Amino acid sequence: EVQLVESGGDLVQPGGSLRLSCAASGFTFSSYSMNWVRQAPGKGLESISYISGSSTTIYYADSVKGRFTISRDNAKNSLYLQMNSLRAEDTAVYYCARVRVGADYWYFDLWGRGTLVTVSS
Amino acid sequence: QSVLTQPPSVSAAPGQKVTISCSGSSSNIGNNYVSWYQQLPGTAPKLLIYETNKRPSGIPDRFSGSKSGTSATLGITGLQTGDEADYYCGTWDSSLSVVVFGGGTKLTVL
């Protein structure tokens, strides 16, 4: 079955760190770019980080730049998000999503179920 | 404040048709394809429309997408109670160099 499964979400204090993982199965993981998208409680979707299949291209949203690091291990079919210096406004459900990208299109054709990160003292 | 503008809510009766608008600019919708996502209550988003008007396998033809200038529209015909969800538009913004989403539209099937 083609699927993405996130893990690693937890309650963490402000200033703390957390590492999210996303396990991919059912498709050739290394052939696809991947993305982390988050959704704060009761709010909309925010794309926060992108990584190409070979990890040669990486993007971050301004809201997380310098604090979060995206990476992947194609041998393990896994995507990661290292989150440092966490703030209350980082509280959200974090989804990993498979990306289909071209010269004039960018969309997410497969989503995981998400993992909840709560930043609070 | 989202880069793409959607109405917060729309509603219609079962069996009827509804449209959801998504307004942007030349740096996003005006020059890039649009995608739409359906998020049922308590679940992850799901791709509904890609490249403005294409449906992934398994998405019924009751769902359609279109674009004119810097605005895009999602259409849903033959509304069912199971269509009650939040709907998001998304696209690449060439000026910001990021994917941008609309703020989401809550569909209520009365």
Image: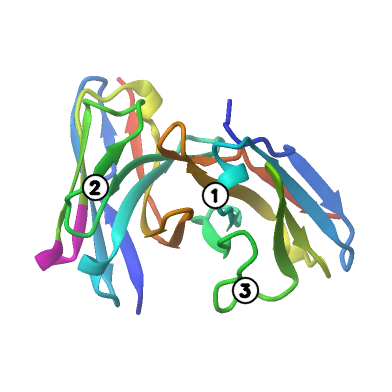
Residue sitting at x 36%, y 26%: A63
Determine whether B8 is above or below B51 in the image. above
Q: Quadrant of residue B105?
A: top right
Residue sitting at x 72%, y 37%: B8
Magenta residues, start to end: A74-79
- Give the mark toward the camera: 1 or 2: 1
Q: Which residue in the structure is indicated by mark 1? A: B32
Q: Quadrant of the N terminus of chain A?
A: bottom left
Q: Position of residue A70 (x, y in %)?
A: 21, 43
Dot 2: element = loop
Residue type pointed to by label 3: Ile
Q: Position of residue A22 (x, y in %)?
A: 26, 56
Q: Nearer the viewer, residue B47 or B33?
A: B33
Q: Which residue in the structure is indicated by mark 2? A: A8
From the viewer's perspective, tell me whether residue B52 is left or right of residue A35: right
Residue sitting at x 71%, y 65%: B64
In the rendered structure, the residue with mark 3 lies on which chain? Answer: B
